[in-house]
Image (tube, helix red, strand yellow):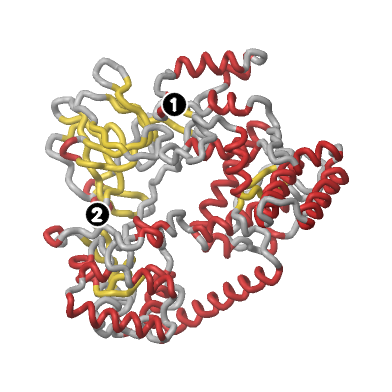
Amino acid sequence: MLKEREETLSESKKQKFLSPFDKKIDEELIKNTVVFKSVNETRKILNELIRRYGSPEYINIEVADDLGRSFKERSKIIKRNNDTQKDREKIKNKLIELGLRKEGEVKPFDIERYRLWEEQEGRDLYTGEAIPLEKILSGIYDVDHIVPFSLILDDSLQNKALVNLGVNRQQKGQQVPLAFLNDVDKIDYLKRVNVLYKNKKISTKKYKYLMLPNLYANSELLTEWKSRNINDTRYITRFLVNYFSANLLFDSTKTKNVFGVKGIITSKMRKLWLNKKTWGDEQKNRDNNLHHAADALVIANLTPAYLEIASDKIKLDRIYKDYHKKISNEYLTYLSKSVNKMVKYYGFNKEYAEKLLGTSNSRIPAMIRNIADEADIRLWDNNIEYYKDVSEEQFYKNAKAFYNDDNNFAKSVKPVLVSYKQNRKYQGKFTKDNPLKKNEIKGAFIEKIDSLGNVNILDAKEYYCAELYKNLQGQTILRGIRYVDLQKKNKKLYIISSYPEDYKKHIMYLFANDYIKVFDKDGKIKFNGYYKSIKNVNRNAIYYKNNNSNILEEKTISKKDVVKKYFVDILGKIGGEIKCSVPFLSLEENI
Protein backbone atom coordinates (compact mmCIF):
# COMPACT_ATOMS: atom_id res chain seq x y z
CA MET A 1 0.00 0.00 0.00
CA LEU A 2 1.33 3.43 -0.84
CA LYS A 3 2.01 5.95 1.87
CA GLU A 4 0.20 8.67 -0.06
CA ARG A 5 -2.95 6.55 -0.20
CA GLU A 6 -2.82 5.52 3.45
CA GLU A 7 -2.44 8.95 5.02
CA THR A 8 -5.75 10.57 5.90
CA LEU A 9 -6.29 13.81 4.02
CA SER A 10 -7.77 16.90 5.61
CA GLU A 11 -11.52 17.35 5.08
CA SER A 12 -10.85 20.22 2.65
CA LYS A 13 -8.77 17.92 0.42
CA LYS A 14 -11.12 14.94 0.47
CA GLN A 15 -13.22 14.37 -2.64
CA LYS A 16 -16.86 13.69 -3.37
CA PHE A 17 -15.66 11.53 -6.27
CA LEU A 18 -12.49 9.45 -6.30
CA SER A 19 -9.96 10.62 -8.89
CA PRO A 20 -8.23 8.23 -11.31
CA PHE A 21 -5.01 6.71 -10.01
CA ASP A 22 -1.74 8.45 -10.84
CA LYS A 23 0.99 6.43 -12.60
CA LYS A 24 3.71 8.06 -10.49
CA ILE A 25 2.00 8.19 -7.10
CA ASP A 26 0.36 4.78 -7.44
CA GLU A 27 3.15 3.01 -9.32
CA GLU A 28 3.29 0.00 -6.97
CA LEU A 29 -0.48 -0.48 -7.11
CA ILE A 30 -0.60 -0.26 -10.91
CA LYS A 31 2.20 -2.83 -11.24
CA ASN A 32 -0.04 -5.51 -9.72
CA THR A 33 -2.50 -5.97 -12.58
CA VAL A 34 -5.01 -8.15 -10.69
CA VAL A 35 -5.18 -5.78 -7.73
CA PHE A 36 -5.24 -2.62 -9.84
CA LYS A 37 -8.10 -3.81 -12.07
CA SER A 38 -10.25 -4.73 -9.07
CA VAL A 39 -9.53 -1.52 -7.16
CA ASN A 40 -10.03 0.69 -10.21
CA GLU A 41 -13.36 -0.94 -11.12
CA THR A 42 -14.52 -0.50 -7.52
CA ARG A 43 -13.56 3.19 -7.71
CA LYS A 44 -15.65 3.62 -10.87
CA ILE A 45 -18.66 1.79 -9.41
CA LEU A 46 -18.55 3.88 -6.23
CA ASN A 47 -18.33 7.12 -8.24
CA GLU A 48 -21.38 6.09 -10.27
CA LEU A 49 -23.33 5.25 -7.11
CA ILE A 50 -22.47 8.67 -5.67
CA ARG A 51 -23.60 10.40 -8.88
CA ARG A 52 -26.91 8.60 -8.67
CA TYR A 53 -27.62 8.62 -4.92
CA GLY A 54 -25.27 11.19 -3.34
CA SER A 55 -22.42 10.83 -0.84
CA PRO A 56 -22.64 7.81 1.48
CA GLU A 57 -23.07 8.01 5.23
CA TYR A 58 -20.87 4.94 5.69
CA ILE A 59 -19.44 2.10 3.60
CA ASN A 60 -19.25 -1.57 4.54
CA ILE A 61 -16.71 -3.78 2.76
CA GLU A 62 -16.61 -7.54 3.14
CA VAL A 63 -13.11 -8.51 4.18
CA ALA A 64 -11.14 -11.67 4.88
CA ASP A 65 -10.98 -12.70 8.52
CA ASP A 66 -7.30 -11.73 8.82
CA LEU A 67 -7.86 -8.00 8.27
CA GLY A 68 -6.88 -7.17 11.81
CA ARG A 69 -3.26 -8.38 11.63
CA SER A 70 -0.91 -7.28 14.36
CA PHE A 71 1.89 -4.78 13.79
CA LYS A 72 4.41 -7.62 14.05
CA GLU A 73 2.61 -9.63 11.34
CA ARG A 74 2.37 -6.61 9.06
CA SER A 75 6.09 -5.92 9.55
CA LYS A 76 6.92 -9.47 8.46
CA ILE A 77 4.83 -9.07 5.30
CA ILE A 78 6.51 -5.75 4.46
CA LYS A 79 9.97 -7.29 4.96
CA ARG A 80 9.06 -10.28 2.77
CA ASN A 81 7.78 -7.99 0.02
CA ASN A 82 10.93 -5.85 0.20
CA ASP A 83 13.15 -8.95 -0.02
CA THR A 84 11.19 -10.16 -3.06
CA GLN A 85 11.64 -6.79 -4.78
CA LYS A 86 15.41 -6.84 -4.11
CA ASP A 87 15.59 -10.35 -5.57
CA ARG A 88 13.74 -9.19 -8.69
CA GLU A 89 16.21 -6.33 -9.17
CA LYS A 90 19.16 -8.72 -8.90
CA ILE A 91 17.68 -11.04 -11.53
CA LYS A 92 16.88 -8.11 -13.83
CA ASN A 93 20.48 -6.89 -13.64
CA LYS A 94 21.74 -10.44 -14.19
CA LEU A 95 19.71 -10.86 -17.40
CA ILE A 96 21.05 -7.53 -18.69
CA GLU A 97 24.65 -8.50 -17.79
CA LEU A 98 24.26 -11.80 -19.65
CA GLY A 99 23.01 -9.93 -22.73
CA LEU A 100 19.66 -11.74 -22.69
CA ARG A 101 17.74 -8.48 -22.38
CA LYS A 102 18.50 -4.81 -22.90
CA GLU A 103 18.01 -2.11 -20.28
CA GLY A 104 14.30 -1.36 -19.91
CA GLU A 105 13.22 -4.56 -21.73
CA VAL A 106 13.14 -7.01 -18.80
CA LYS A 107 9.57 -8.23 -18.29
CA PRO A 108 8.02 -9.98 -15.25
CA PHE A 109 7.82 -13.30 -17.12
CA ASP A 110 11.58 -13.05 -17.89
CA ILE A 111 12.27 -12.84 -14.15
CA GLU A 112 9.86 -15.71 -13.59
CA ARG A 113 11.75 -17.93 -16.07
CA TYR A 114 15.09 -17.18 -14.42
CA ARG A 115 13.70 -17.93 -10.94
CA LEU A 116 12.31 -21.27 -12.15
CA TRP A 117 15.61 -22.12 -13.90
CA GLU A 118 17.52 -21.38 -10.69
CA GLU A 119 15.02 -23.28 -8.52
CA GLN A 120 15.25 -26.31 -10.85
CA GLU A 121 19.08 -26.17 -10.70
CA GLY A 122 19.28 -25.50 -14.43
CA ARG A 123 17.36 -28.60 -15.51
CA ASP A 124 14.03 -29.38 -17.16
CA LEU A 125 11.85 -30.40 -14.22
CA TYR A 126 10.05 -33.10 -16.23
CA THR A 127 12.84 -34.67 -18.34
CA GLY A 128 15.95 -33.78 -16.34
CA GLU A 129 17.73 -32.40 -19.41
CA ALA A 130 20.05 -29.44 -18.87
CA ILE A 131 18.64 -26.02 -19.82
CA PRO A 132 21.39 -23.65 -21.01
CA LEU A 133 21.08 -20.31 -19.22
CA GLU A 134 21.40 -18.42 -22.50
CA LYS A 135 18.33 -20.27 -23.85
CA ILE A 136 15.85 -19.72 -21.00
CA LEU A 137 14.13 -16.78 -22.72
CA SER A 138 13.92 -18.49 -26.11
CA GLY A 139 10.94 -20.24 -27.64
CA ILE A 140 12.52 -23.63 -26.96
CA TYR A 141 11.25 -23.64 -23.38
CA ASP A 142 7.82 -23.18 -21.90
CA VAL A 143 6.51 -22.10 -18.50
CA ASP A 144 3.98 -24.82 -17.70
CA HIS A 145 1.28 -25.09 -15.04
CA ILE A 146 2.15 -28.32 -13.19
CA VAL A 147 -1.54 -28.84 -12.39
CA PRO A 148 -3.74 -27.19 -15.06
CA PHE A 149 -4.55 -23.64 -13.99
CA SER A 150 -8.21 -24.05 -14.95
CA LEU A 151 -8.61 -26.75 -12.27
CA ILE A 152 -6.98 -25.11 -9.24
CA LEU A 153 -6.65 -21.45 -10.26
CA ASP A 154 -3.08 -21.31 -8.92
CA ASP A 155 -0.99 -19.04 -11.15
CA SER A 156 1.90 -18.66 -8.69
CA LEU A 157 5.42 -20.08 -9.05
CA GLN A 158 4.28 -22.89 -6.75
CA ASN A 159 2.39 -24.30 -9.74
CA LYS A 160 4.90 -23.56 -12.51
CA ALA A 161 7.85 -25.30 -14.13
CA LEU A 162 10.30 -24.34 -16.88
CA VAL A 163 10.21 -27.21 -19.38
CA ASN A 164 10.80 -28.16 -23.00
CA LEU A 165 8.11 -26.67 -25.26
CA GLY A 166 7.66 -29.80 -27.38
CA VAL A 167 7.32 -32.15 -24.41
CA ASN A 168 4.84 -29.84 -22.69
CA ARG A 169 2.61 -29.14 -25.69
CA GLN A 170 2.70 -32.55 -27.38
CA GLN A 171 3.02 -35.03 -24.50
CA LYS A 172 1.95 -33.61 -21.14
CA GLY A 173 -1.09 -31.63 -22.25
CA GLN A 174 -3.90 -31.28 -19.71
CA GLN A 175 -2.29 -33.69 -17.22
CA VAL A 176 0.07 -33.74 -14.24
CA PRO A 177 3.69 -34.87 -14.83
CA LEU A 178 3.32 -38.36 -13.30
CA ALA A 179 0.36 -39.08 -15.59
CA PHE A 180 2.32 -38.72 -18.85
CA LEU A 181 5.85 -39.94 -17.95
CA ASN A 182 6.70 -43.58 -18.71
CA ASP A 183 7.82 -45.95 -15.94
CA VAL A 184 11.55 -45.44 -16.53
CA ASP A 185 11.31 -41.62 -16.67
CA LYS A 186 9.10 -41.60 -13.57
CA ILE A 187 11.91 -43.08 -11.45
CA ASP A 188 14.35 -40.32 -12.45
CA TYR A 189 11.64 -37.66 -12.08
CA LEU A 190 10.75 -38.76 -8.53
CA LYS A 191 14.43 -38.78 -7.50
CA ARG A 192 14.87 -35.29 -8.94
CA VAL A 193 11.78 -33.86 -7.21
CA ASN A 194 12.67 -35.46 -3.87
CA VAL A 195 16.20 -34.01 -3.98
CA LEU A 196 14.85 -30.53 -4.71
CA TYR A 197 12.40 -30.83 -1.83
CA LYS A 198 15.03 -32.19 0.57
CA ASN A 199 17.37 -29.31 -0.34
CA LYS A 200 14.49 -26.84 0.25
CA LYS A 201 14.54 -25.66 -3.36
CA ILE A 202 10.79 -26.18 -3.68
CA SER A 203 7.95 -25.65 -1.19
CA THR A 204 5.72 -28.30 0.35
CA LYS A 205 2.81 -27.11 -1.77
CA LYS A 206 4.81 -27.41 -5.00
CA TYR A 207 6.08 -30.84 -3.91
CA LYS A 208 2.47 -32.01 -3.47
CA TYR A 209 1.55 -30.72 -6.93
CA LEU A 210 4.54 -32.49 -8.50
CA MET A 211 3.76 -35.76 -6.69
CA LEU A 212 0.12 -36.00 -7.78
CA PRO A 213 -0.26 -39.36 -9.59
CA ASN A 214 -3.24 -38.04 -11.57
CA LEU A 215 -5.91 -35.33 -11.48
CA TYR A 216 -8.25 -37.40 -9.32
CA ALA A 217 -5.85 -38.44 -6.54
CA ASN A 218 -6.25 -35.54 -4.12
CA SER A 219 -9.51 -33.61 -4.39
CA GLU A 220 -8.72 -31.53 -1.29
CA LEU A 221 -5.56 -30.19 -2.89
CA LEU A 222 -7.37 -29.41 -6.13
CA THR A 223 -10.11 -27.45 -4.34
CA GLU A 224 -7.69 -25.58 -2.09
CA TRP A 225 -7.30 -22.82 -4.69
CA LYS A 226 -10.90 -22.63 -5.84
CA SER A 227 -10.96 -18.92 -5.04
CA ARG A 228 -8.57 -17.25 -7.47
CA ASN A 229 -5.84 -15.03 -6.03
CA ILE A 230 -7.19 -15.15 -2.49
CA ASN A 231 -4.14 -13.28 -1.20
CA ASP A 232 -4.78 -10.53 -3.76
CA THR A 233 -8.39 -10.38 -2.59
CA ARG A 234 -7.30 -9.86 1.01
CA TYR A 235 -4.90 -7.14 -0.07
CA ILE A 236 -7.61 -5.45 -2.17
CA THR A 237 -10.10 -5.26 0.68
CA ARG A 238 -7.49 -3.91 3.10
CA PHE A 239 -6.46 -1.31 0.54
CA LEU A 240 -10.07 -0.20 -0.08
CA VAL A 241 -10.87 0.22 3.62
CA ASN A 242 -7.89 2.57 4.02
CA TYR A 243 -8.27 4.25 0.62
CA PHE A 244 -11.95 5.17 1.09
CA SER A 245 -11.37 6.33 4.66
CA ALA A 246 -8.50 8.59 3.65
CA ASN A 247 -9.82 10.10 0.41
CA LEU A 248 -13.64 10.17 0.31
CA LEU A 249 -16.11 12.74 1.59
CA PHE A 250 -18.95 11.25 3.63
CA ASP A 251 -22.38 12.61 4.50
CA SER A 252 -21.60 12.09 8.17
CA THR A 253 -20.01 13.81 11.15
CA LYS A 254 -18.59 10.54 12.49
CA THR A 255 -14.82 10.05 12.55
CA LYS A 256 -15.08 6.47 11.23
CA ASN A 257 -17.13 5.85 8.11
CA VAL A 258 -15.64 2.71 6.49
CA PHE A 259 -16.08 -0.67 8.13
CA GLY A 260 -14.75 -4.12 7.33
CA VAL A 261 -17.40 -6.84 7.53
CA LYS A 262 -15.95 -10.32 8.00
CA GLY A 263 -17.27 -13.01 5.68
CA ILE A 264 -18.49 -15.09 8.61
CA ILE A 265 -20.80 -12.22 9.66
CA THR A 266 -22.21 -11.88 6.13
CA SER A 267 -22.90 -15.61 6.03
CA LYS A 268 -24.58 -15.62 9.45
CA MET A 269 -26.80 -12.59 8.72
CA ARG A 270 -27.75 -13.91 5.26
CA LYS A 271 -29.07 -17.12 6.82
CA LEU A 272 -30.78 -15.17 9.63
CA TRP A 273 -32.43 -12.44 7.55
CA LEU A 274 -33.21 -13.94 4.13
CA ASN A 275 -35.70 -16.56 2.95
CA LYS A 276 -34.23 -20.07 3.24
CA LYS A 277 -35.98 -21.09 0.02
CA THR A 278 -34.13 -18.42 -1.93
CA TRP A 279 -31.16 -16.36 -0.72
CA GLY A 280 -30.87 -17.50 2.90
CA ASP A 281 -30.19 -21.16 2.13
CA GLU A 282 -27.28 -22.93 3.84
CA GLN A 283 -25.65 -23.40 0.43
CA LYS A 284 -25.31 -20.47 -1.96
CA ASN A 285 -26.54 -20.89 -5.52
CA ARG A 286 -23.23 -20.13 -7.25
CA ASP A 287 -24.71 -20.96 -10.65
CA ASN A 288 -26.21 -17.46 -10.61
CA ASN A 289 -24.29 -14.23 -9.93
CA LEU A 290 -27.19 -12.75 -7.94
CA HIS A 291 -25.82 -14.46 -4.83
CA HIS A 292 -23.28 -11.59 -4.81
CA ALA A 293 -26.18 -9.10 -4.80
CA ALA A 294 -27.78 -10.95 -1.88
CA ASP A 295 -24.52 -10.68 0.09
CA ALA A 296 -24.24 -6.98 -0.79
CA LEU A 297 -27.80 -6.42 0.46
CA VAL A 298 -26.95 -8.08 3.76
CA ILE A 299 -23.66 -6.18 4.16
CA ALA A 300 -25.36 -2.83 3.43
CA ASN A 301 -28.00 -3.49 6.10
CA LEU A 302 -25.46 -3.83 8.88
CA THR A 303 -25.28 -0.43 10.56
CA PRO A 304 -22.03 0.26 12.46
CA ALA A 305 -23.75 -0.46 15.78
CA TYR A 306 -25.29 -3.76 14.73
CA LEU A 307 -22.06 -4.74 13.00
CA GLU A 308 -20.39 -4.47 16.43
CA ILE A 309 -23.19 -6.56 17.94
CA ALA A 310 -22.87 -9.25 15.23
CA SER A 311 -19.09 -9.43 15.58
CA ASP A 312 -19.20 -9.66 19.38
CA LYS A 313 -22.01 -12.22 19.31
CA ILE A 314 -19.96 -14.53 17.07
CA LYS A 315 -17.03 -14.21 19.49
CA LEU A 316 -19.32 -14.97 22.47
CA ASP A 317 -20.76 -18.01 20.68
CA ARG A 318 -17.23 -19.35 20.13
CA ILE A 319 -16.32 -18.88 23.81
CA TYR A 320 -19.58 -20.63 24.80
CA LYS A 321 -18.78 -23.63 22.57
CA ASP A 322 -15.14 -23.77 23.74
CA TYR A 323 -16.40 -24.28 27.30
CA HIS A 324 -18.73 -27.12 26.23
CA LYS A 325 -21.80 -24.86 26.07
CA LYS A 326 -21.39 -23.53 29.60
CA ILE A 327 -21.30 -19.92 30.81
CA SER A 328 -17.66 -19.30 31.81
CA ASN A 329 -15.90 -16.37 33.47
CA GLU A 330 -14.31 -15.55 30.12
CA TYR A 331 -17.78 -15.42 28.54
CA LEU A 332 -19.17 -13.12 31.26
CA THR A 333 -16.14 -10.79 31.09
CA TYR A 334 -16.40 -10.43 27.31
CA LEU A 335 -20.18 -9.98 27.50
CA SER A 336 -19.79 -7.18 30.08
CA LYS A 337 -17.20 -5.37 27.93
CA SER A 338 -19.40 -5.67 24.83
CA VAL A 339 -22.50 -4.38 26.60
CA ASN A 340 -20.63 -1.42 28.11
CA LYS A 341 -19.21 -0.56 24.68
CA MET A 342 -22.69 -0.49 23.11
CA VAL A 343 -24.02 1.69 25.94
CA LYS A 344 -21.08 4.11 25.94
CA TYR A 345 -20.43 4.57 22.22
CA TYR A 346 -23.76 3.77 20.56
CA GLY A 347 -26.29 4.91 23.18
CA PHE A 348 -27.90 1.47 23.55
CA ASN A 349 -30.15 0.66 26.48
CA LYS A 350 -28.21 -1.78 28.72
CA GLU A 351 -31.03 -4.33 28.92
CA TYR A 352 -31.49 -4.28 25.13
CA ALA A 353 -27.76 -4.79 24.53
CA GLU A 354 -27.68 -7.69 27.01
CA LYS A 355 -30.67 -9.28 25.29
CA LEU A 356 -29.08 -9.08 21.83
CA LEU A 357 -25.67 -10.29 22.97
CA GLY A 358 -26.48 -12.73 25.74
CA THR A 359 -29.58 -14.52 24.44
CA SER A 360 -28.96 -17.50 22.16
CA ASN A 361 -32.07 -17.00 20.00
CA SER A 362 -31.93 -13.18 19.84
CA ARG A 363 -32.42 -11.68 16.37
CA ILE A 364 -30.17 -8.83 15.25
CA PRO A 365 -32.39 -6.47 13.22
CA ALA A 366 -31.65 -5.39 9.65
CA MET A 367 -31.70 -1.68 8.82
CA ILE A 368 -34.78 -2.08 6.58
CA ARG A 369 -37.99 -3.89 7.43
CA ASN A 370 -39.15 -6.98 5.56
CA ILE A 371 -35.67 -7.51 4.11
CA ALA A 372 -36.45 -11.13 3.16
CA ASP A 373 -39.59 -10.15 1.18
CA GLU A 374 -37.81 -7.28 -0.54
CA ALA A 375 -34.86 -9.50 -1.48
CA ASP A 376 -37.22 -12.09 -2.98
CA ILE A 377 -38.94 -9.45 -5.11
CA ARG A 378 -35.85 -7.53 -6.23
CA LEU A 379 -33.48 -10.45 -6.87
CA TRP A 380 -35.74 -12.03 -9.49
CA ASP A 381 -34.27 -14.14 -12.27
CA ASN A 382 -36.34 -16.83 -13.96
CA ASN A 383 -33.19 -18.87 -14.60
CA ILE A 384 -33.50 -19.77 -10.90
CA GLU A 385 -35.87 -22.62 -9.98
CA TYR A 386 -37.77 -20.57 -7.38
CA TYR A 387 -38.64 -17.92 -10.00
CA LYS A 388 -39.24 -20.16 -13.03
CA ASP A 389 -42.99 -19.41 -13.04
CA VAL A 390 -42.58 -15.67 -12.35
CA SER A 391 -42.63 -13.69 -15.60
CA GLU A 392 -40.99 -10.29 -16.07
CA GLU A 393 -44.47 -8.77 -16.19
CA GLN A 394 -45.23 -10.33 -12.79
CA PHE A 395 -41.93 -8.98 -11.43
CA TYR A 396 -43.07 -5.41 -12.16
CA LYS A 397 -46.49 -6.10 -10.61
CA ASN A 398 -44.83 -7.44 -7.45
CA ALA A 399 -42.57 -4.40 -7.21
CA LYS A 400 -45.50 -2.03 -7.65
CA ALA A 401 -47.48 -3.79 -4.90
CA PHE A 402 -44.52 -3.86 -2.49
CA TYR A 403 -43.69 -0.16 -2.96
CA ASN A 404 -47.35 0.96 -3.10
CA ASP A 405 -46.56 4.03 -0.97
CA ASP A 406 -44.06 5.38 -3.53
CA ASN A 407 -45.22 4.98 -7.14
CA ASN A 408 -42.29 6.91 -8.61
CA PHE A 409 -39.78 4.63 -6.92
CA ALA A 410 -41.78 1.54 -7.90
CA LYS A 411 -41.60 2.62 -11.56
CA SER A 412 -37.82 2.99 -11.33
CA VAL A 413 -37.28 -0.58 -10.12
CA LYS A 414 -35.76 -2.86 -12.76
CA PRO A 415 -34.53 -6.46 -12.65
CA VAL A 416 -30.98 -6.71 -11.31
CA LEU A 417 -28.40 -7.45 -14.01
CA VAL A 418 -24.74 -8.31 -13.55
CA SER A 419 -22.43 -5.94 -15.43
CA TYR A 420 -19.38 -7.25 -17.28
CA LYS A 421 -16.55 -5.19 -18.70
CA GLN A 422 -16.24 -5.64 -22.47
CA ASN A 423 -12.95 -7.26 -23.49
CA ARG A 424 -11.50 -5.60 -26.61
CA LYS A 425 -7.82 -5.67 -25.66
CA TYR A 426 -5.66 -6.74 -28.57
CA GLN A 427 -2.93 -9.02 -27.27
CA GLY A 428 -1.55 -12.42 -28.15
CA LYS A 429 -2.30 -15.37 -25.90
CA PHE A 430 0.74 -17.13 -24.45
CA THR A 431 1.00 -20.74 -23.29
CA LYS A 432 -2.44 -22.16 -22.53
CA ASP A 433 -3.67 -25.06 -20.39
CA ASN A 434 -5.42 -26.59 -23.41
CA PRO A 435 -2.56 -27.20 -25.85
CA LEU A 436 -3.37 -28.00 -29.44
CA LYS A 437 -3.17 -31.58 -30.67
CA LYS A 438 -0.15 -32.81 -32.61
CA ASN A 439 -1.95 -32.57 -35.93
CA GLU A 440 -2.79 -28.93 -35.17
CA ILE A 441 0.75 -27.81 -34.34
CA LYS A 442 1.61 -26.70 -37.88
CA GLY A 443 0.46 -23.12 -38.28
CA ALA A 444 -1.01 -23.09 -34.78
CA PHE A 445 1.61 -20.77 -33.32
CA ILE A 446 3.36 -17.61 -34.36
CA GLU A 447 6.69 -16.33 -33.09
CA LYS A 448 7.15 -12.96 -31.45
CA ILE A 449 10.84 -11.99 -31.52
CA ASP A 450 12.30 -9.26 -29.31
CA SER A 451 15.21 -6.96 -30.13
CA LEU A 452 17.78 -9.55 -28.95
CA GLY A 453 16.32 -12.37 -31.00
CA ASN A 454 14.54 -14.19 -28.17
CA VAL A 455 11.46 -16.03 -29.42
CA ASN A 456 8.11 -16.10 -27.61
CA ILE A 457 5.36 -18.42 -28.81
CA LEU A 458 1.88 -17.00 -29.37
CA ASP A 459 -1.28 -19.02 -29.94
CA ALA A 460 -2.37 -18.11 -33.46
CA LYS A 461 -5.68 -19.96 -33.23
CA GLU A 462 -7.12 -17.69 -30.55
CA TYR A 463 -10.06 -15.56 -31.68
CA TYR A 464 -9.88 -11.82 -31.10
CA CYS A 465 -13.59 -11.34 -31.85
CA ALA A 466 -16.48 -12.63 -33.92
CA GLU A 467 -18.01 -10.87 -36.91
CA LEU A 468 -21.60 -11.15 -38.08
CA TYR A 469 -22.10 -10.34 -41.74
CA LYS A 470 -24.72 -10.65 -44.48
CA ASN A 471 -23.85 -13.01 -47.31
CA LEU A 472 -24.91 -12.64 -50.95
CA GLN A 473 -28.23 -14.33 -50.14
CA GLY A 474 -28.95 -11.86 -47.32
CA GLN A 475 -28.38 -14.44 -44.57
CA THR A 476 -26.74 -13.79 -41.20
CA ILE A 477 -23.35 -15.53 -41.04
CA LEU A 478 -20.81 -15.82 -38.21
CA ARG A 479 -17.08 -15.77 -38.77
CA GLY A 480 -14.13 -15.67 -36.39
CA ILE A 481 -11.36 -13.11 -36.57
CA ARG A 482 -8.13 -14.41 -35.06
CA TYR A 483 -5.28 -12.38 -33.65
CA VAL A 484 -3.18 -13.29 -36.70
CA ASP A 485 -5.91 -11.96 -39.00
CA LEU A 486 -5.15 -8.47 -37.69
CA GLN A 487 -2.19 -6.15 -37.66
CA LYS A 488 -1.67 -3.04 -35.57
CA LYS A 489 -0.33 -0.01 -37.40
CA ASN A 490 -0.29 3.59 -36.14
CA LYS A 491 -2.46 2.51 -33.16
CA LYS A 492 -5.15 1.18 -35.51
CA LEU A 493 -6.13 -2.41 -36.25
CA TYR A 494 -6.17 -3.53 -39.88
CA ILE A 495 -7.46 -6.85 -41.19
CA ILE A 496 -4.90 -8.73 -43.27
CA SER A 497 -6.86 -11.90 -44.05
CA SER A 498 -9.17 -12.24 -47.03
CA TYR A 499 -12.93 -11.73 -46.79
CA PRO A 500 -15.13 -14.82 -47.31
CA GLU A 501 -16.25 -15.31 -50.91
CA ASP A 502 -19.92 -14.83 -49.97
CA TYR A 503 -19.23 -11.64 -47.94
CA LYS A 504 -21.61 -8.80 -48.81
CA LYS A 505 -22.15 -6.50 -45.81
CA HIS A 506 -20.72 -6.09 -42.30
CA ILE A 507 -23.32 -6.26 -39.48
CA MET A 508 -21.31 -6.07 -36.22
CA TYR A 509 -18.38 -7.35 -34.23
CA LEU A 510 -18.97 -9.35 -31.07
CA PHE A 511 -16.45 -9.05 -28.25
CA ALA A 512 -16.45 -11.03 -25.01
CA ASN A 513 -19.08 -9.62 -22.62
CA ASP A 514 -21.14 -7.78 -25.24
CA TYR A 515 -24.83 -7.82 -24.25
CA ILE A 516 -26.95 -9.14 -27.13
CA LYS A 517 -30.56 -9.95 -27.96
CA VAL A 518 -31.27 -12.43 -30.75
CA PHE A 519 -34.63 -12.17 -32.53
CA ASP A 520 -36.19 -14.71 -34.87
CA LYS A 521 -37.65 -13.80 -38.29
CA ASP A 522 -40.96 -12.82 -36.64
CA GLY A 523 -39.28 -10.41 -34.22
CA LYS A 524 -39.61 -12.58 -31.11
CA ILE A 525 -36.66 -12.83 -28.71
CA LYS A 526 -34.96 -16.24 -28.95
CA PHE A 527 -32.39 -15.54 -26.26
CA ASN A 528 -30.56 -12.64 -24.64
CA GLY A 529 -27.51 -12.30 -22.44
CA TYR A 530 -23.75 -11.86 -22.59
CA TYR A 531 -21.82 -13.14 -25.59
CA LYS A 532 -18.69 -14.96 -24.42
CA SER A 533 -16.94 -16.68 -27.31
CA ILE A 534 -17.25 -18.62 -30.54
CA LYS A 535 -18.24 -22.28 -30.27
CA ASN A 536 -18.30 -23.30 -33.95
CA VAL A 537 -18.25 -20.89 -36.91
CA ASN A 538 -19.49 -23.54 -39.33
CA ARG A 539 -22.69 -23.91 -37.30
CA ASN A 540 -23.08 -20.22 -36.37
CA ALA A 541 -22.70 -21.44 -32.75
CA ILE A 542 -21.60 -19.25 -29.84
CA TYR A 543 -21.16 -19.48 -26.08
CA TYR A 544 -23.14 -17.04 -23.96
CA LYS A 545 -24.39 -16.50 -20.41
CA ASN A 546 -28.09 -15.93 -19.85
CA ASN A 547 -28.17 -12.59 -18.00
CA ASN A 548 -27.12 -13.36 -14.40
CA SER A 549 -26.47 -17.04 -14.97
CA ASN A 550 -22.91 -18.21 -14.33
CA ILE A 551 -23.31 -21.21 -16.61
CA LEU A 552 -21.86 -21.12 -20.10
CA GLU A 553 -24.49 -22.17 -22.67
CA GLU A 554 -24.22 -22.97 -26.36
CA LYS A 555 -26.61 -21.19 -28.74
CA THR A 556 -26.96 -21.17 -32.50
CA ILE A 557 -27.72 -18.01 -34.47
CA SER A 558 -30.01 -18.91 -37.35
CA LYS A 559 -29.29 -17.46 -40.79
CA LYS A 560 -32.62 -15.61 -40.60
CA ASP A 561 -32.07 -14.25 -37.08
CA VAL A 562 -31.51 -10.59 -36.26
CA VAL A 563 -28.87 -9.80 -33.62
CA LYS A 564 -28.85 -6.53 -31.68
CA LYS A 565 -26.22 -5.30 -29.24
CA TYR A 566 -27.03 -3.09 -26.23
CA PHE A 567 -25.12 -0.83 -23.87
CA VAL A 568 -25.04 -1.93 -20.21
CA ASP A 569 -23.72 0.63 -17.75
CA ILE A 570 -21.41 -0.14 -14.83
CA LEU A 571 -24.39 -0.60 -12.47
CA GLY A 572 -26.11 -3.11 -14.77
CA LYS A 573 -28.71 -0.85 -16.38
CA ILE A 574 -29.52 -1.76 -20.00
CA GLY A 575 -29.37 1.26 -22.26
CA GLY A 576 -29.99 1.80 -25.94
CA GLU A 577 -29.00 -0.31 -28.91
CA ILE A 578 -25.40 -0.06 -30.08
CA LYS A 579 -25.50 0.50 -33.81
CA CYS A 580 -23.33 -1.24 -36.37
CA SER A 581 -19.62 -0.53 -35.84
CA VAL A 582 -17.26 0.44 -38.64
CA PRO A 583 -15.50 -2.66 -40.02
CA PHE A 584 -11.73 -3.04 -39.79
CA LEU A 585 -9.91 -1.52 -42.73
CA SER A 586 -8.00 -3.84 -44.99
CA LEU A 587 -4.27 -3.18 -44.74
CA GLU A 588 -3.81 -4.00 -48.42
CA GLU A 589 -6.34 -1.33 -49.36
CA ASN A 590 -4.51 1.28 -47.30
CA ILE A 591 -0.91 0.71 -48.33
- 10 Å crowding of disc 2: few (<14), some (14-19), many (20+): some
Instruction: Pick the residue in front: 70 or 317.
Output: 317
Which of the labelled discs sits on residue 386, or is there none? Answer: 1
Q: Is residue 243 visible?
A: no
- 10 Å crowding of disc 1: few (<14), some (14-19), many (20+): few
Residue 525: x, y in percent? 32, 21
On screen, residue 263 above or below 507: below
Residue 449: which quarter of the image? bottom left
Residue 446: which quarter of the image? bottom left
Please state which amino acid type lies under the numbered disc 1: Tyr
In the image: residue 571, left or right of residue 590: right
In the image: residue 394, left or right of residue 520: right
Residue at 43% from the left image edge and 34% from the top image edge = 548
Residue 470: x, y in percent? 21, 30
Instruction: Pick the residue in front: 441 or 493.
Output: 441
Q: Which of disc 1 and disc 2 is earlier in sequence?
A: 1
Q: Which residue is mark 2?
A: 484
Q: Quadrant of the N terminus?
A: bottom right
Dot 1: element:
helix
Residue at 41% from the left image edge and 78% from the top image edge = 202
Dot 2: element:
helix
Which of the labelled discs sits on residue 451, or is there none? Answer: none
Please state which amino acid type lies under the numbered disc 2: Val
Residue at 46% from the left image edge and 73% from the top image edge = 104
Q: Are marks 2 and 1 in contact (CB under 8 Å)?
A: no
Residue 192: x, y in percent? 31, 83
On screen, residue 467 above or below 473: below
In the image: residue 124, left or right of residue 262: left
